Image (cartoon, helix red, strand yellow):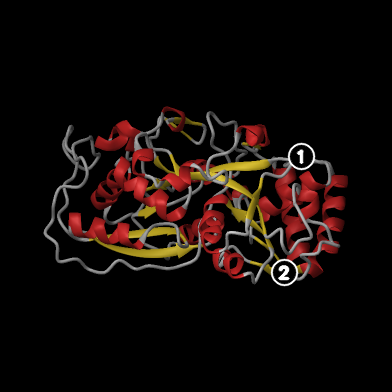
Amino acid sequence: MKRWKNRRQSGILLALGLTGIMALSACGGETTVGGGASSAPASSAAGSEAASPEAPAGDFPTPNGGELNLYNWTDYISPDLLKRFESETGITVNLDNFDSNETMLAKLQAGGANYDVIVPSDYMVAQMIELGLLQEVDPASFPNGQYIKPEFMDVYFDPGRKYSAPYMYGTTGIAYDPTKTGGEITSWAAFFDANSPAAGKIGTLNDQVEVIHAALRATGAQPCSTNREDYVKVEELLAGWKPGVAVINSDGVIGRMASGEQTMHMMWNGAFTRAQADNPNLQYVYPAEGITLWSDNFAVPVGAQNVDNAKIFINWMMDPANIGEATNFVGYDNGITGSSEFMTADLGANPAVVIPDEFKALAAPVPGCSVEAIDLYDQVWTNFKK
């Protein structure tokens, strides 16, 4: 999703080297669900006994009713899962949605929101730590912190998991219907082809970085290039392609592709699996020029009013059964050990979810851009969106 636009505000350059399988970006979907009040008695959340800055050493908060204000990507958590959390804990969940990391960051910086748990992407976690916007709640020490997969523990954006807990991870590729595109699509170059048979029914995410990453790759350059000539080529490519683009929107992608409203779309792999369930013709592409890996995470912002409930929720979501249910809904894999036992078999066998061996070399983290590159991204995106 759209990233980095406000990074200059932090006055830093983020070195985005990454261990394991995580990278830059984010994901989501398309519906808003508010958690209603629950009359269920407060009960012990999944596993509840780790250190909490607000409680005596060795204590972990226990559910005592109240509320939890959750700020998440659109359609990125199961409504039934939230209802079960409410029933088991007596905590009422109030859900609000955002469509990009920058939207979330701007709202928090403006001081007009009161959220207890947010879901930033990897690079945004690092940025928010630098900006002093996240509380150090040490999720790795929570009772269910023991289930964090080793490769998700010492991550570049939060070493040792002091500020964040893993949620989902995935890729951003191309979804298309080969019966309507004149054949197979295998590359970003084909996606950005102004003469594509899909012209007029092409959609793309409203994501500055992903779109420009992909366009740079399509022109033979690499993401975060500082060569201005590369961006001249990208602007020319996007200008020729734009007349065939029907929609630039990160919300509603699942419905548009499932219904056939769009024939080809830049898409997150989890959203793709949900669209494919309704439209089996759809295919997911690992473009030959490369594809971005990303991860999303739970974090507690500074100023949260219900910190204990935030810890209870994050710990509850790190239970393998609960995060497994979340994966079944969103269609992305997660960072919790043991969750595969609770995932449906079709997800584990879906090449859009589990990267096939022949495409693993194409899926990789994207290094952090310099300020010079970020400025070039901004300029190209502004011109494209005019």
Which residue is at a point 54% across and 61% down the rendered structure image? 275
Q: Which amino acid, by three-letter code, is at mark 1?
A: Gln
Instruction: Residue under label 1, please give it.
Output: 222
Q: Earlier in the sequence, mark 2 or mark 1?
A: 2
Which residue is at a point 74% across and 47% down the rendered structure image? 186
Q: CA distance from mark 2 to mark 1?
A: 27 Å
Q: Which amino acid, by three-letter code, is at mark 2?
A: Lys
Image coordinates of residue 367 in percent, x first then y, are 65, 36
In front here: 292 or 208? 292
* Left or right placement of residue 187 versus residue 237 in this view: left
Residue 84 picture quarter: bottom left
Image coordinates of residue 70 in percent, x first then y, are 36, 58
Image coordinates of residue 294 in percent, x first then y, are 55, 43
Which residue is at a point 87% across and 51% down the rendered structure image? 233
In the structure shown, which secondary structural element does the residue marked by tag 1 occupy? loop
Say whether residue 317 is visible.
Answer: yes
Residue 145 picture quarter: top left
Say whether residue 296 is visible.
Answer: no
Residue 201's disc is 2
Within 10 angstroms of label 1, few (less than 14), some, or many (20 or more) residues? Answer: some
In front here: 268 or 182? 182
| Residue extending farthest left | 41
Quarter of the image with the N terminus in it:
bottom right
Which residue is at a point 40% across and 31% down the rendered structure image? 149
Image coordinates of residue 194 in percent, x first then y, are 84, 61
* Left or right placement of residue 233 versus residue 151 in this view: right
